[in-house]
Image (cartoon, rainbow, N blue to C red):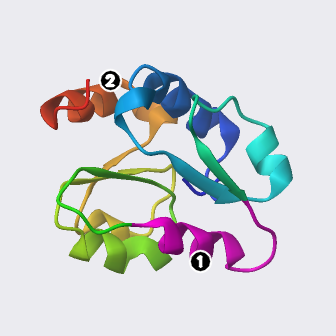
Amino acid sequence: MDADNVPPRRLQPVLDLLSAVADRIRLTASGRSQALDALDWPAGSELLPHAGWQRADVALADAYSPADVPLILVTGDGDFALLAARHPGAVLVVSGAPSGRLRDHALVVDPATDGTAPIASWLQAHGIT
């Protein structure tokens, strides 16, 4: 999760939904400390405070593990398009304004306009409930 790239009003509903499955997922987030502190994170979340151009992106890329499991990217940043394209499992992108490159290889949901039902359905379809 890119806490600098997705505003709290879009991110918090997703975090609330993921809290129910926190024991079955690995949640990693990076961004400025202020952005991370503005949210209520599920238990066990790995928060990587970083400031400065691209440092949060690098921290998230370093935390990524390519495995044939579902991946949720909460970002609109096109820098993650190659990761989404090469990920061996299903990919969900949560963003209000995702890069067009992210749309090519993932289902995209905007919780501010679509609500969290599509995310819950995706989680269920991929056995994360």
Examine the rendering and report whether any part of residue 30 can be seen. yes
The nearer-to-camera label among 1 and 2 is: 1
Check residue 58 for magenta coloring. Answer: yes
Q: Nearer the viewer, residue 109 or 73?
A: 73
Above or below: residue 104 compared with residue 32: below
Check residue 61 for magenta coloring. Answer: yes
Name the disc covering residue 4, or none: none
The residues colored magenta run 49-64
Above or below: residue 58 compared with residue 119: below
Q: Quadrant of residue 37?
A: top right
Is disc 1 placed on a helix, strand or loop? helix
Above or below: residue 45 compared with residue 90: above
User: Relative to 48, is 113 on the left or the right?
Assistant: left
Q: Of the residues shown, which amino acid type is indicated by label 1?
A: Val
Measure how far apart labels 1 and 2 are at the Cα level.
30 Å
Q: Nearer the viewer, residue 16 or 61?
A: 61
Name the residue tied to disc 2: 117
The C terminus lies in quadrant: top left
Q: Residue at the location (79% across, 37% down)?
A: 38
Name the residue tied to disc 1: 58
Q: Residue at the location (64% across, 33% down)?
A: 41
Q: Of the residues shown, which amino acid type is indicated by label 2?
A: Ala
Q: Residue at the location (70% across, 76% down)?
A: 55
User: Relative to 23, is 129 on the left or the right?
Assistant: left
Q: Position of residue 75 (x, y in %)?
A: 51, 58
Structural crowding at the residue carrying mark 2, measured as other residues with C-alpha within 10 Å and reported as few (<14), some (14–19) or many (≥20): few
Is disc 2 placed on a helix, strand or loop? helix
Above or below: residue 76 compared with residue 14: below
